[in-house]
Image (tube, grey):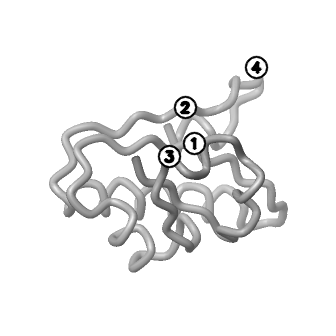
Amino acid sequence: MRVLARDANRLAVRPWREQVEVVEGAVGEVDALRRAMHSAEVAHYLVRSMQAGADFTARDLRNAQVFAEAARKAGGRHVVYLGGLLPKNGSSRAEVG
């Protein structure tokens, strides 16, 4: 199993750390995603953007699109998206999903 992390050092305290390969990078970085998804059949999108700002929705959607494209190019057969609950008033989460 391979994981993508912005800071690989932050995973050192995780009990599962020695059982995974860590690729350092961000979800919006094409090269990091390419390395992380090399020969992967399944990719899990467990991303929840915590940044705010006027461009939050566009950035969140772009990250999901870059992720899906990287999975497709890697030959992946499945992308599993685990997003947050959708509020009644709508959310960018539905579009990203």
* Amino acid under disc 1: Leu
**Would you say 48 lies left or right of 61 here?**
right
Mark 1 vs 4, N-terminal side: 1
Of badges 4 and 3, nearer the viewer stands 3
Measure the alpha-carbon separation of dots 3 and 2.
22 Å
Name the residue located 72 percent from the left edge and 46 percent from the top edge: 14
Mark 3 vs 2, N-terminal side: 3
SS label for mark 1:
loop
Q: Residue 88 carries which label?
A: 4
Q: Residue furthest left?
A: 75
Residue 83, image x, y percentages = 60, 33
Measure the alpha-carbon separation of dots 1 and 4.
22 Å
What residue is pinned by disc 1? 46
Residue density around tag 4, few if under 14, some if 14–19, many if 20 or more, within 10 Å: few
Residue 33, image x, y percentages = 41, 67
What residue is pinned by disc 3? 19
Of badges 4 and 2, nearer the viewer stands 2
Measure the alpha-carbon separation of dots 4 and 3.
39 Å
What residue is pinned by disc 2? 82
